[in-house]
Amino acid sequence: MTEEPRPDAVLPADRGRARLPDRTGTVVRDGVPLAWEVYGEGHVTVLLLPTWSLVTSRAWKAQVPYLARHYRVVTFDGRGSGRSGKPSGAAAYADREYAADAVAVLDDTGTDAAVLVALSCGAAWAVHVAARHPERVRGIFAIGASCGLAVAQPERERYAWHLRHDTDRGWAKYNKWHWLEGGLDDFRGFFFDRMFHEAHSTKQIEDCLDWSSTIEPQVLADTRAGGLGLDGAVAEPLEPLCAQVRCPVTVLHGREDRIRSAKVGERLAELTGGDLVLVEGGGHGLPAREPVLVNTLIRGFVDRVCPPAPVVRTKVRAPRRGRRVLYLSSPIGLGHAYRDVAISAELRKLRPDVEVDWLTQDPVTRVLAGAGERVHPASAWLANESGHLEAEAGEHDLHAFQAVRRMDEILVNNFMVFDEVVRERHYDLVVGDEAWDVDHFLHENPERKHFLFAWLTDFVGSLPMPEGGAAEARLTADYNAEMIEHRARYPWVRDRSVFVGNPDDVVADDFGPGLPSIRAWTAEEFDFAGYVAGSPPPSSTARAALRRSLGYRPEHRVCVVTVGGSGVGAPLLRRVLDAVPLARRVDPSLRFLVVCGPRIDPASLPRRTGVRVRGYVPRLAEHLAACDLAVVQGGLTTCMELAAAHTPFVYVPLRRHFEQNLHVRHRLDRYDAGRHLAYDEASDPDLLAEVLLSTLAEGSSARPVETDGAARAAAMLAELF
């Protein structure tokens, strides 16, 4: 065994992962290295077998984090894929070899026995292991079985895999010669389109194209020849082996599987005496396309064949329960935290008996701690969304739409945490402030809703950035269409949709070609609370007292520079610091408070005369209300707090961030608030210093911002009780 230490830094390949392995290693069997990973711990081990070597073990990305919270999970790249070896010749890829690899990985990871979970080709290998090594297998959960059982599929069988054909249409692409003679990419596109035939599967297809992008045509040809018993390989009949399986078996298959007919799954269940679960409308890629369903079914199966230890639970009769709220506050920036604390405070005024638990993560938890709120302990299980966005960001550059798309594994994990929390304890109301995971997966799995659900957001609709071209426009339209379809099909999933703003704050764009106007659709779907301020702006008298309490000297003009709760804004802080000496040369009374937030190390920034650098500042809202000038990113909450306080400010949106550049800028233009500055312009210290001085001199002409938004939003929530 060769065990490899995990690197401290997040590697590019690890971005977007909800959980990294606890151990990694490589075992060599018959000269072939097999790269494995181990997650979690427990008395039960789940071995997620490799599938066809066209893709890597990352195909299990939606299952690993959830299962690893309950069991010890082992994965490995099958021979021919990923970090494992790629031997030559079809004989090296016979089913017997993959099964022997699984046993070698069990041995190398110190696993006596495991529950085997298999996808597609892996179902045959699970049967081989269970038949030949029954003491090592506690159960088989097979998904979308694609194995050598006698089930006719005329569409596929029309074109023999090993013969040349005079066409490359349809299943003729599934052909050795087509792959070897330049058609592999053509086949990959065809195959994954059929694997994920369900609407709105662009991300699943994109993932599989990525995972399969490095496989060599000859290696792929060898893998299929090995399974078919061609080119010197021997294919063993599976039926006799199925008869030898003695462990519990469950087979899960999509009724509309366009890779392998559901009849294959039915036959496997029949031959092994296993249970059969058929998914109406489901295709071949169920683990990726229906992760909540697959995760819960796998856990149910594992707990049935390996019963967990008894637990003691206390349930409270309904008449004895107080009113309970579970509040989900998005950790992407601190703005959600400030407004959600204000809303919860107003809700308690209306319903003093309400108990509020918060399911959220850093940096929101820091705000909640300061407010004396109760954070649910399961928050520790959430995968960090802010950290993911920081890993996605460049220099003041965050492609927000694509970053969220690539956060899908994290969102699945976080929904599964939420789902367990609301099943363990009853909550009357769940409030989701841009809790995208919960809203999406409740619409995908509406049967899991057993509580009132209120949705809050300050923007609606994904918009393409111009540099993304037609491809990005198609993707954003597809995401918007899915949301519109969700709401039309299951309007009762949300008991209230609250827009943090007013109707005219919504952009006038369409959701996409052939889709409705965003403003018109939002007006029909949402109630409007107006802007929700974390705290009302002070009067002129109170502002003077506030400045004194914050330590501002009367002769100083104070500029606050802040970039929110993520670590994305460090480059902007450095550019402002470069402009500080130039601005202070013109106006020596200027003093700067640079707020790094909770995720930027103040020691990483250069020191300048007249500048205080601080990390997390709990009273940041008071500084924004009391200062003479501010420089910020394009986050809505910070900008609107400044507008409400009539504080002059310069905002520099992150490049390619559609919300900051389109939604937020639209609202700020409507309020005549702030001065927009592109990041490229801020690269010139002289220009930036000039903009700071002129903005300070001009003052604020922002329109009044309502201050009762928190009370209005709380009243909308209270009505649900």
Image (cartoon, helix red, strand yellow):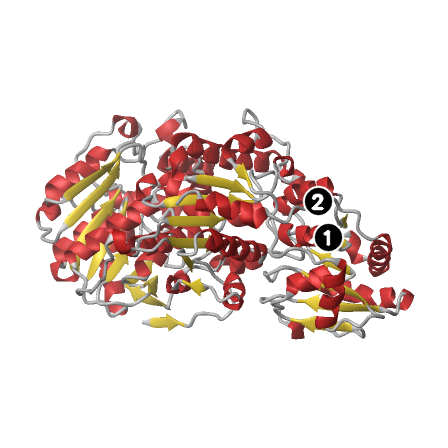
- Residue situated in front as seen by the camera: 255 or 160: 255
Query: Is 689 positioned to the left or the right of 107 in the image?
Result: right
The N terminus, quarter of image: bottom left
Dot 2 alpha-carbon crowd within 10 angstroms: few under 14, some 14 to 19, many 20 or more: many
Q: Quadrant of residue 272?
A: top left
Mark 2 and mark 1 in contact? Answer it, CB < 8 Å: yes
Point out residue 121 in the picture as x, y percentages from the top left corner.
Answer: 27, 45
Q: Would you place residue 117 above or below residue 591 in this image?
A: above
Res. 402 in view: no
Point out residue 401 in the picture as x, y percentages from the top left corner.
Answer: 56, 45
Q: Secondary structure at mark 1?
A: strand
Question: Where does label 1 land, which residue?
Answer: 651
Q: Quadrant of residue 77?
A: bottom left
Q: Secondary structure at mark 2?
A: helix
- Looking at the rendered structure, which numbered label has been put on residue 150? none
The C terminus, quarter of image: top left
Q: Comparing marks 2 and 1, which lies closer to the viewer?
A: 2
> Tag count in the figure?
2
| Residue lying at 54% horizontally and 45% vertically, measured from the top left | 712
Question: Where does label 2 land, which residue?
Answer: 668
Q: Would you place residue 521 above or below residue 204 in this image?
A: above
| Residue lying at 46% horizontally and 38% vertically, measured from the top left | 202
Q: Amino acid at mark 2?
A: Leu
First in residue order: circle 2 vs circle 1: 1
Q: Amino acid at mark 1?
A: Tyr
- Residue situated in front as seen by the camera: 55 or 500: 500
Res. 520 in view: yes
- Find the distance from the CA under tag 2 to the CA under tag 1: 10 Å
Dot 1 alpha-carbon crowd within 10 angstroms: few under 14, some 14 to 19, many 20 or more: many
Point out residue 470 in the picture as x, y percentages from the top left corner.
Answer: 60, 33
Point out residue 549 in the picture as x, y percentages from the top left corner.
Answer: 70, 71
